[in-house]
Amino acid sequence: MPCSHAVRLHDLSTPALVVDAGMLEHNLATMAAALPGDRCRPHVKAHKTTALARRQREVGHPGFTCATPREALGLAATGLGDDLLIANEVVDPERLAALAGLDNARITIAVDSEATIAAAAAAGLREVVVDVMVGLPRCGCLPGDAGRLADLARSSGLEVRGVMGYEGHVTVIEDTAKRAEETERSMTELLRAYADVGGDIVSAGATATYALNSWATEIQAGSYALMDTTFERLGTPFGRALFVWATVVSVLPGWTVADCGLKSLGMDHGDPTIDDAQVLLCSDEHVTFVPDPDHAVDVGDKMRVWPAHIDPTVAYHEQMHLAVGNEIVETWPVDLRGW
Amino acid sequence: MPCSHAVRLHDLSTPALVVDAGMLEHNLATMAAALPGDRCRPHVKAHKTTALARRQREVGHPGFTCATPREALGLAATGLGDDLLIANEVVDPERLAALAGLDNARITIAVDSEATIAAAAAAGLREVVVDVMVGLPRCGCLPGDAGRLADLARSSGLEVRGVMGYEGHVTVIEDTAKRAEETERSMTELLRAYADVGGDIVSAGATATYALNSWATEIQAGSYALMDTTFERLGTPFGRALFVWATVVSVLPGWTVADCGLKSLGMDHGDPTIDDAQVLLCSDEHVTFVPDPDHAVDVGDKMRVWPAHIDPTVAYHEQMHLAVGNEIVETWPVDLRGW
């Protein structure tokens, strides 16, 4: 919602999620230029915020990727349901029925087994893609099994729109040439499955491979909008647009402490980063760090803490604030949290 | 709230936080017997749930420890505000004013600097403890500075109730004798500060030291109520009472996947644990694991996932379900989340 009165960055209570509006727009425009329209299907799991998804549609992407039923239901409720792909296996009958009951959204869901096909058909869903395991040890059928599952889905009354396969294992490869090579290997597997499945869609990819994956018809990129310190190392043109705004609460001779910790930061990729400082440790509500000698701070000073992984960071917060310089211009509810 | 109709564990949508009611009661009774009444000041940061705090009061503990203003405001709003210690430094004027404005709660807040004392006094708070750094690199003044800060607080119109010092660095020491030795070293520092500060309270401790710390007048234990796989290694009499209930969504020849990942588990202490299985990796909404050969599971099966650290796990969830065997007897909102 637009703010009714001017709020400044330094007035925010902390910890708070803040988005640099200029960097966000740069990231969105860069992706929209590289993969316009339906060639990018932005993944909302990375930001869980319908207001940000609306910006992604405004720059040209008509469809979205979701990880959870609630993400899809939330997008549909705000008129963003034109073409939603739940790129995940769901067998919960109530949640599937809620998706099937939407009259203002097109829902396509991933299936990778007889059980997930049966669950989708029983709930009254109409469209699926066959999820194929292309290297990441997670969901997805073996490539050689995709054709059989597509036949089973069709004989169960489902329309099969194509295949998806997430080459997530390559996103940790920092060397671009090696990442490209592994992406090709994964997509060869996916196209082998696609030959047996048919349909219009070959959905794959990520921020880490958006410029390398020329085999997929659409790229499920999520992190590119907000980015984090981990994805930044991959050398994409996207910049860090999201930080946790924190307040210094304690200064000792050997270290300094700010009010941002394990409950405001996803920690699976390790500690956050602070400019001009070394992070020592995080605890529930604190980050302890050592400022560089010429960058000491005082109690009450506010500062940026850069998360290592945005997805589980955003999921802790109720809202994110959009900043232009030092002014907060909008506050967006993180309204797609939960399942 | 009590459930209006019988809900079974296997009917819950997943991922879901579930508390084993019998183990919770065992843990609460064990602590209440060891440290009755005000000798334990349960830390609500570990569970962020007023309904659970109410059970802690029912077994005899009149006061609570909080990490955030919202935790204290929430406890006060439900009549649990008799004696709330915010064991953390806060300089946010609005939040401090909200605490000072409570007319149904006794609020004591930690201070460790001139700035935190000034902020508390300016907001109209009345009572403080001096927070002393006793080994953990986080907040707290140096022990030799505590007396000066107590004098400053008193001359600022604040009542100084005593000292606190969190020996959090010892909670990682698995050897009990060494943990006891380090606890004594920390408490020697705290008592040195206390001699300069005065008051009635020496607040310290944790689940890891509740039976070792004989110097504190009250122990700020939090994890004991729900526990996790990390604290279990310390050999306390408390048992794991909280798990994330998950559904198997994909089974491949080499691994199995359930719907519980980085957004339903605090990951700072590493991967969760699954009985009769080896966890391979977690991603945003999934845990990939290898079941033991005689414990294979099928798509749709439900299972327990044991978090490595409860505090940041609970903070992801909107509610926790209290289970007696396979029946859900109550559902408690996790109503103290946020700041």
Image: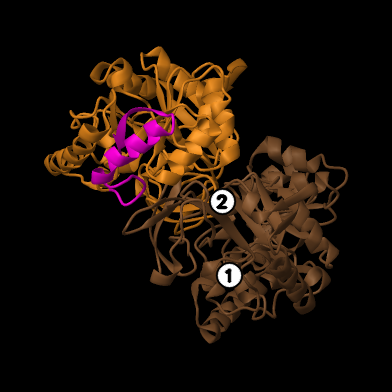
Chain colours: A brown, B orange
Q: Please give the residue where the numbered disc 2 appears in the rendered image.
A: B285
Residue B42 x/y as whole percent: 37, 26
What residue do we see at 52% from left, 65% from top?
A136
Q: Is residue A157 visible?
A: yes
Element at badge 2? loop
Residue B108 lies in magenta, yes or no? no
Q: Which residues are magenta?
A: B136-165
What residue do we see at 73% from left, 50% from top?
A331
Residue B137 lies in magenta, yes or no? yes
**Residue B268 placement, left or right of B259:** left
Mark 1 crowdedness (10 Å alpha carbons): few <14, some 14-19, many ≥20: many
What is the number of the mark on residue B185?
none
Most foreground residue, B261 or B246: B261
Q: Is residue B326 visible?
A: no
In the displayed structure, would residue A58 be above or below residue B264? Answer: below
Residue B105 x/y as whole percent: 50, 19
Most foreground residue, B329 or A129: B329
**Residue B248 placement, left or right of A282:** right
Tell me the quarter of the picture where residue A337 sits. top right
**Residue B267 placement, left or right of A90:** left
Most foreground residue, B207 or A133: B207
Residue B164 x/y as whole percent: 31, 35
- The nearer-to-camera label among 2 and 1 is 2
> Is the Cβ of the residue at disc 2 closer than 8 Å to that at disc 1?
no
Specify the quadrant that holds the N terminus of chain B.
top right
Tell me the quarter of the picture where residue B33 sits. top left
Q: Please give the residue where the numbered disc 1 appears in the rendered image.
A: A167
In the displayed structure, would residue B297 be above or below residue A58? Answer: above
What residue do we see at 27% from left, 33% from top?
B197
Pointers 2 and 1 within a single chain: no
Most foreground residue, B330 or B326: B330
Element at badge 1? loop
